[in-house]
Image: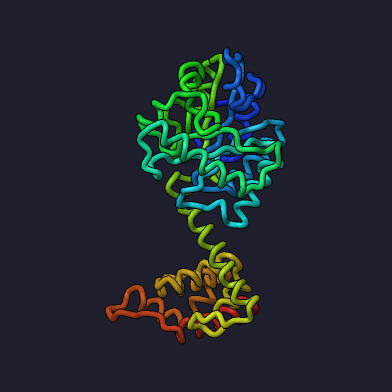
Amino acid sequence: MDTKTFDFLNESTYRELLKLTKAKYTIKGFEVLDCNVIPTSFAIIRHDVDMSPERALALAKIEAEEGIRATYTILLTGEFYSPFEKQVRNQISQIAELGHDIGLHFDAAWHGIETEIQLEDKIQWETEILTKLLSSDQNHLVRMFSFHNTTPFTMGCRERSYGGLRNAYAGVLQDQVQYTSDSNGYWIHRSWKTLLDENHERIQVLTHPEWWSTYDAYPGEKVTRTLMQRHLVTWANYCDLLQIGNRNNKLGLRNGQDVLRSLWGEKGENILLLWLNGNRNLAALQVWLLLAEKNQEIVLEISDWQNLFEEMIFGKRQFCFTNQSFEALLSFAEKFMNE
Ligand SMILES: [Zn+2]
């Protein structure tokens, strides 16, 4: 296979790379650190879950299908997800149930750690929290950790374990195991495929699940979509909560949410969020474009609306959709789409 095929990080290249790896190596976990002499001919597959537990679970399923055990490290102190969210905790449990190892992803800078003694203490503290959170059974105890955002200090912490957890950056692994990582959405040392082609005795591949999407895109696009997806889920939970409690979800629109949802599902919900977020003209224009997608000719003939959009785009006067005009557009859209 052409190496160019592996330039994009997505689910299908992920599966291919796994297959190539298991054809060449025995896949092991960080228990290799328990042997005095590190064994030969193994590959460790590690995922630091920085942003997306949802993507982590998707990769965990692919690995399970390929009969591979990987290690997933969970960040307690990140900004992109919290393992305390019910859905996230559930995703992590599912990863463990698929037979993978769960570790701690540890941010020394968050604690302001400067010495190895402080490190012992804080790792124990976080391990206790993560263990309680996952109510781990004996098979899924947290036994290893990796540093988040490594620094010269953390790379200098070379003991095999700290705070009772095996260290993914132990000196012996740094010295004897060849390593690569997709840290910012691209390979920083060399690609996984190149690492395989180099025929080393032992390798450790670190991937971050957020980059291995179902589609090809630039890393910045993947981060944004991950954030927007989370945003949408949080919004949906908020709306559900109001509905369950029989509370009024006051949006300034009579039935705009229902119309947008019923006409365009998630896309419609995103338009509503654009509207509520203050991007009113853009939200209205999105509706208009969706109508044009259904039938451009008819849409262009409806002169009232067409004039309004022309005025919005080209007009000299500042025009802004109001709640009333947006609702009128939505009732028109409802009729137009159901015709
Ligand atoms: Zn990290």
How far from the left and from the top, in percent, is residue 106? 48, 39
Above/below status of 77 relative to 160 = below
Query: In this view of the protein, which residue sits in the foreground, 142 or 289?
Result: 142
Query: In this view of the protein, which residue sits in the foreground, 251 or 104?
Result: 104
Q: Residue at x 45, y 38 (%)?
A: 148
Q: Residue at x 51, y 83 (%)?
A: 253
Query: Which quadrant of the view contains residue 152?
Result: top left
Judge whether residue 293 can be spotted in this image.
no
* 293 lies left or right of 112: right
Q: How is the image coloured?
A: rainbow
Query: In this view of the protein, which residue sits in the foreground, 215 or 244?
Result: 244
Q: Residue at x 58, y 65 (%)?
A: 266
How far from the left and from the top, in percent, is residue 32? 60, 21
How far from the left and from the top, in percent, is residue 247? 59, 81
Above/below status of 338 relative to 76 = below
Q: Quadrant of the N terminus?
A: top right
Query: Which quadrant of the view contains residue 39?
Result: top right
Above/below status of 202 relative to 241 = above
* 313 lies left or right of 122: left
Judge whether residue 202 can be spotted in this image.
yes
How far from the left and from the top, in percent, is residue 227? 48, 55
